[in-house]
Amino acid sequence: MKIRSKRTKIADWIVAAICFIVIMICILPMLNLLAQSMSSSQSVINGKVTFMPVLFNESKIETSEDPYRYGITLEQYRYVFLDPSFTRSMWWTAILTVICTILSLTMTILCSYPLTYDWLRGKTFINTFIIFTMYFSAGTIPNYILMKTLGLLNNPLVLIIPNCLSVFNMIILRSFFFGIPDSLRESAEIDGANPFTVLIRIYLPLSAPVLATLALFYAVGRWNGFTDALLYLSSAPQWVPIQLKLWQLIQNMTSIDVTTVEMVSGVVPRATDAIKAAAIMFATVPILVVYPWLQRYFIAGVTIGAVKG
């Protein structure tokens, strides 16, 4: 039976209050963005966006004292869904995320598993060489020259091959493999299992939490990545991922389909803030949906190496 003092209870309440404040600080901008995406463009321009807007009623627009408080409308999402370039970028990013996650996990496993064997020749050199690449890199211009020399510019493979392995994630998986008792591997080897069989039958089933965690890291990293596409896909709009499309929208380099946005004086208008908010929600919600499915594995994976009482 544990005895808790009043001081301990007060400290718990303080920690809970701090956590609640931090959560609200993180959630409020997202709620504000959602409210903007469900409000009319004129309401956003005039600062009439509220977190609980009234339902849209077209008959009251002419007689209302506040003509800009139109309430909830999904018109902005219609603009986004009707834009073929946006939907194409969304599907391409989803396919790209799945491919990169599977490939990255495969490369991480194949790199970390051999390093668990003490009899591996050059193990120290390989470890040092791999860790060296985590702290030192050539830079943006040499990387661009390398991609150009390899013929990967304006090629979808430039979004897959260069970042298919994270040294940091490899170290995490290798540390987890080290925590698996050697007796399991030795007993399997006595029964005639080769290293590949040991990996498939013993190591991978026991590594489900850390693999799910790394899969989430890789998927979120690829979904949110746009720098490589910005540098290497300058003349290949068909391979533009959704985040680069959003960046172009925010920077007003491109706009939603011209035929769906109101034109003034024959000049192509800039995308409104309401449409920008709808586009951001359109690109953010899918990756948020993935997290609940991996939550139980994620919690187990991030606590690897924690002190257990």
Image (cartoon, grey):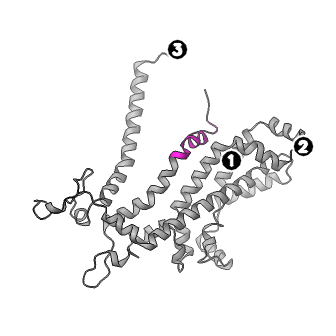
For label 1, the residue is: 173
The residue under label 1 is which amino acid type? Leu
Q: Nearer the viewer, residue 69 or 13?
A: 69
The picture places residue 153, in percent across and down from the top left corner, at: 61, 77
For label 2, the residue is: 192
Total of numbered circles in the picture? 3
The residue under label 2 is which amino acid type? Gly
Residue 305 highlighted magenta (yes or no): yes
Quarter occupied by the C terminus: top right
Element marked by disc 2: loop
Image: magenta residue range:
292-306
The picture places residue 99, in percent across and down from the top left corner, at: 62, 62
Element marked by disc 1: helix
Q: Nearer the viewer, residue 12 or 152?
A: 152
3D distance between C-alphas at marks 3 and 2: 50 Å
Residue 220 highlighted magenta (yes or no): no
The residue under label 3 is which amino acid type? Met
Give the dominant element type of the magenta stretch: helix, strand or loop. helix
The picture places residue 157, in percent across and down from the top left corner, at: 63, 71
228 relative to 4 in the view: left or right: right
Q: In the image, what residue occupies the spot 74% across and 41% down?
A: 178
Query: Label for residue 295?
Result: none
Q: In the image, what residue occupies the spot 63% across and 73% down?
A: 142
Q: Nearer the viewer, residue 141 or 60?
A: 60
Element marked by disc 3: loop
